[in-house]
Image (cartoon, helix red, strand yellow):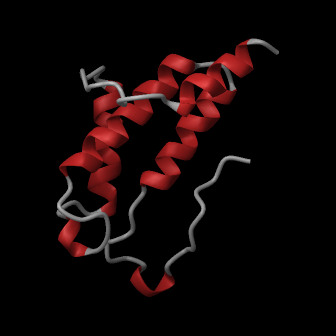
Amino acid sequence: MFEAIHGSAPDIAGRGWANPIGAVLSTAMCLAHLGDGAAARAVEAAAVHLLAQLPSTAGPARGFPTQQLGREIAGLVKNGATVPAVPGHSIMDDLADLSSGR
């Protein structure tokens, strides 16, 4: 139910070029569905914050290998870093609202 929509990219396996943001945002959707809107918004905001800093979203030009990008997002969430909320309307708000009304 909560998975990133992309292939496994076997041609770049082990190179650190894969972008984990889809999987991270799927985790945020799962958290929202489970009713933890605050955690969902924190994960989403951290991912969007880092995406805005990347020179590219894929391959070596991205500047962060896959593992480091994942660690950076996890660190922002774990340490409660203050990152701006996602501008406009976040789907995580809708998911959390729907889940809390079950």
Task: Pinpoint residue 39: horizontal percent, then vertical percent.
Answer: 49, 23
Residue occupying the point 74% across, 48% down: 1
Task: In this rendered view, identify the residue nearer to me: 83 or 27.
Answer: 83
Q: Give the farthest residue toward the top.
A: 101
Task: In this rendered view, identify the residue nearer to me: 12 or 28.
Answer: 28
Is 60 rendered above or below residue 10? above
**What is the tally of numbered marks visible in this picture?**
0
Task: Pinpoint residue 30: horizontal percent, then vertical percent.
Answer: 63, 35
Q: Give the farthest residue toward the bottom.
A: 11
Q: Is residue 30 left or right of residue 16?
A: right
Q: Is residue 62 left or right of residue 90?
A: left
Q: Give the farthest residue toward the right.
A: 102
Quarter of the rendering containing residue 66: bottom left
Task: Pinpoint residue 24: horizontal percent, then vertical percent.
Answer: 47, 46
Residue occupying the point 34% across, 25% down: 85
Is 29 rendered above or below residue 11? above
Q: Give the farthest residue toward the front.
A: 88
Position of the C terminus by quadrant: top right
Residue occupying the point 50% across, 44% down: 25
Residue occupying the point 37% across, 76% down: 14
Is 78 rendered above or below residue 44? above
